[in-house]
Image (cartoon, rainbow, N blue to C red):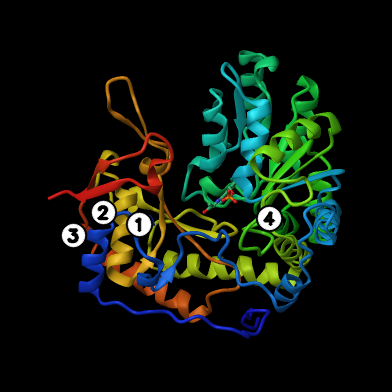
Amino acid sequence: MKTIIEPFKIKSVEPIYFTTFHQRKELLRAAHYNPFLLKAHDVIIDLLTDSGTSAMSSAQWAGIMLGDESYAGADSFFKFEAAVKKITGLPVVIPTHQGRAAEKILFTILGGAGKTVLSNTLFDTTRANVEFTGAEGLDLVCAAGKQPGLIADFKGNIDLIALDTHIQQLGADNIPAVVITITNNSGGGQPVSMENIRGARAICTKYQIPLIIDACRFAENCYFIKMREPGFKNHTVLEIAQQLFSHADMVTMSAKKDAFANIGGFLALQDEVLAQQFRNLLIVTEGFPTYGGLAGRDLEAIAQGLEEIVDEDYLKYRIRSIEYIGDKLSEQGIPLVLPTGGHAVYLDAASFLPHIPRHEYPGQALACALYLHGGIRGVEIGSVMFGKYGKDGGLISPPLELVRLAIPRRVYTQSHMDYVTEVITDVYHHRNTIRGMKITYEAPMLRHFTARFEMLG
Ligand code: F0G
């Protein structure tokens, strides 16, 4: 088989600025050992996120010039609405300035004290928006999803038995929604199967609970369904997406991922009565219902991006390019979440640095080491992002301690990724010299964004 090449040519480029080890040592110290606090200019390969970092196509840039900036009823809105309806089949489409704005509106109406939102895994902003209302979020990912090294096809699935049991225990009236995140970002970018979505749908119907799909990376998820799930090989990714969304009552999406846009999101749903409540909030916080916090040109870029994302030559390249990094690291025995997911490679920091206990944040230490040694910026997804304090003040760690290297869409080439694997391999060989970290400042919510650290002696 021949190399699977990037299915695009590059028309416009941005410079990368290089730094030395000694410069990065100082820059990291000044950023309080939190890669979020580094300047992007000082990063060589930026794998902090795949969100809003895509390279737009020439057709998207052309769309930017077509943007209709009318306050109400702009042409660009109708193009956007048609693109979302084509994929989701849902009749109501509400634009928002990004995914979390859709979540904020959704849970302000659905959430509240005493309620519990059940999920395969809530992303951190989704959880924060649930908890901000006084409700709780509970993750019920399947057993395979908790074992980083275990090879399985759909490690993002929700545990359907646990879902049913929790609904019975908590009472259906106290569950305002079940949220399925596709792909499961916080659990390694792992896909959810159609069968699992159907199962969740049946349980939600039985207890009359709305099923919400967090669709940020729906195209990557649907490509995995095509490749791995029996019965889908001859379906297009668009058809698979349409079938998948036919099971949802509502969909939230950050268009910063699988719509190749730099900003934007939406909420789409069946229920016109609920939609009216959402729109009332939208007008207060986002804007008029035909622009929802976005410029007309953003709506154009999203509409075009949603057409491009279901292109299977693109998706084949996308999924293979992530797998390529995973293969190279696995050859060196480097522990990571396997199989590789849709948008990122997740290093298993707990196994990478077994000498650093969880309360000394091995994920954070590894993220810092990657920057120091190669100017690579990734993000900790572990005890810093999801850790909680128990009644005795001790840290309660989440099941996995990961460092995510998220790959921006259509931005980096194979040689950039070869460099990344070389740096990680180098760090792996020196892993015994890496030390743990301690937190010196943290915010009460979403602490990972602004926390400050010190390296332990
Ligand atoms: N849901 C998922 C699964 C996400 O990954 C994100 C964002 C959101 C919701 C929120 O969307 O950023 O547009 O408000 N994830 C980014 C990331 C930030 O780096 O994974 P947003």
Which residue type does callout 1 highlight?
Leu
Residue at 62% across / 65% down in the picture?
A: 319
Q: In this view, does 413 lie above or below 238?
A: below
**Rendering coords of residue 33 (x, y %):** 27, 55
Frontmost of labels 4 and 1 is: 4
Query: Is disc 2 in contact with disc 1, using a CB cutoff of under 8 Å?
Result: yes
Secondary structure beneath label 4: loop
Instruction: Mark 2: give few (<14), some (14-19) or many (20+) Cα within 10 Å.
Output: many
- Kind of residue at disc 2: His
Residue at image position (26%, 54%) is 32
The label shown at residue 244 is none
Of the residues under marks 4 and 1, which one precedes in the sequence?
1
Q: Residue 433 carries which label?
A: 3
Describe the element under mark 3 as helix, strand or loop: helix
Q: Which of pointers 1 and 3 lies earlier in the amino acid sequence?
A: 1
| Number of the label disc, if any, that sits on residue 294 | 4
Residue kind at label 3, given as amino acid type: Thr
